[in-house]
Image: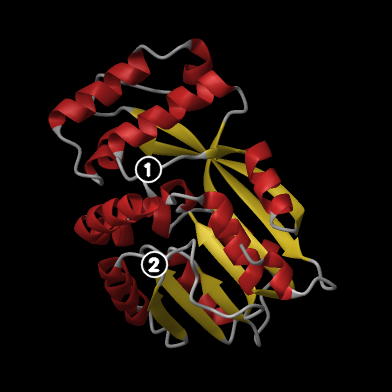
Amino acid sequence: MGAGEQGTLVQERFGQFAQGYVTSKTHARGEEMDRLVAIADPQLDWIILDVATGGGHTALKFAPFVAQVVATDITPRMLEKAGAYIASNGIANVTYEPADAGDLPFGDGTFDLVTCRIAPHHFPDSPRFVREGARVLKAGGLLLVQDHVLPEEQETARLVDAFEKLRDPSHQRAFSENEWAAMMREAGLNVELTEQVIKRHDFLPWAERQGCTSGTIERLSEMVLSAPAAVAEWMQPRGFGTPDASFVNHHIIISGRKDKAMPAKEYRS
């Protein structure tokens, strides 16, 4: 699938399921949100960019700590829902702009912080997103990413990623911690921190948030029940075959800082 086709698929699916992502507990109430703020240490004069803002939860979290947040998303309906949600919380220092994560419509060295949370697995070219994030950062600025992370062992990673893609065809690809660190370094960023977060999901609401049919839900269940030991160890399934089924996925939090001495033009794709 080409980058244009992937972008269209993401727009279609997230336009359809936008409200579900605004109200998703996983996206809205992740305990790691406070951790992201602590890592970034935002300042009151900062301008920050939230790439692929989705329901607007990260933009909302950071807005009280900075001068301005620019929230972008490739899906206009997501931006509309995010804007309404953020405004309903009394926040007025967030602006909204449709944008492709791989082709950000901002000048070099514009932002003090670039955030992107639970989104890069949808991008057709995540390394390009990281390069773009580095480009629009000011010297000394920070790129802070949270996303699905895969095990380092390739076959286990392939099966875990296939499970995610069956549930959501707009899922392009997740990466391992080593792959994320390599992307940051290749974009000229100094990796300052990597952490992993384990998140348990109730299986049925997780599947239904992407409109999975009963047939797809059955296939997802079968994938878990027949999973090799290494996959089962990674996903820690409970109660599959019952309404209380749950599993975990793993997220990475990774930050990369732009060298203060490096001119912005060095980061262009």
The answer to whether residue 129 is left or right of residue 138 is: left
Which quadrant holds the N terminus? Answer: top left
Q: Nearer the viewer, residue 76 or 29?
A: 76
Badge 1 crowding class, 10 Å Cα cut-off, few under 14, some 14 to 19, many 20 or more, is: many
Lower position in the chain sequence, tag 2 or tag 1: 2
Q: Which labelled disc corresponds to residue 171?
A: 1
The answer to whether 49 is drawn above or below residue 21 in the figure is below
Q: In this orientation, does residue 98 appear?
A: yes
Q: Residue at x 25, y 68 (%)?
A: 77
189 horizontally vs 1: left or right: right
Label 2 and label 1: CA atoms lie apart by: 16 Å
Identify the residue position indicated by label 2 in the image. 73
Identify the residue shown where x is 38% and y is 38%: 201
Residue at the spot 31% in from the left edge and 65% down from the top edge: 75
Colour style of the rendered protein structure: secondary structure
> In x, y percent, where is residue 118?
47, 52
Q: Nearer the viewer, residue 76 or 237?
A: 76
* Label 2 packing within 10 angstroms: few (<14), some (14-19), many (20+): many
**265 shown above or below 46:** above
